[in-house]
Amino acid sequence: MSCGHYEQTVENALHDVDGASDARADREAETATVEGDPDTTELVEAIEDAGYTAHA
């Protein structure tokens, strides 16, 4: 998570998940917060597909 565009990349990936109405990523805290009612598995897969490691 050291690259400068991490937050934007992860937020874009999470916004594409059905049911996610908003997403915020924090590179320093290594966390992401999603609003809405998305499927957790799909969120993890979206982050992994973007090239990062994720867990719920």
Image (tube, rainbow, N blue to C red):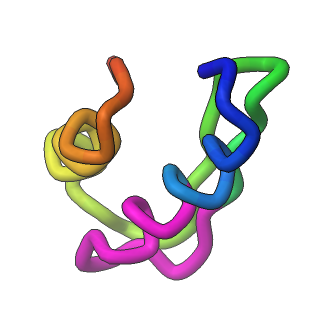
> Compared with residue 19, is residue 56 higher up or lower down, i.e. above or below?
above
Magenta segment, which residues?
11-23
Based on the picture, tell me whether residue 45 belongs to the magenta stretch.
no
Depth order, front residue of 2/39:
2
Residue nearest the observer in this picture, 44 or 2: 2
On screen, 10 above or below 53? below
Q: Residue at x 83, y 21 (%)?
A: 28
| Residue occupying the point 32% across, 76% down | 16
17 in magenta: yes
x and y percentages locating residue 40 in the rendered image = 26, 44
Which of the 4 image quadrants contains residue 55?
A: top left
- Residue at left offset 61%, top offset 40%: 32
Q: How many marks?
A: 0
Which quadrant holds the C terminus? top left
Q: Which quadrant would residue 13 be assigned to in this image?
A: bottom left
Tell which of 24 and 7 is nearer to you: 7
Does residue 45 sit above or below 42 in this rendering? Answer: above
| Residue farthest to the right, as pictured | 28
Up the image or down, 3 lies above or below 6; here it is above
Q: Residue at position x 48%, y 69% from top?
A: 12
| 12 to the left or right of 56 | right
Q: Which percent across, then down, holds residue 43?
A: 29, 48
Position of the N terminus by quadrant = top right
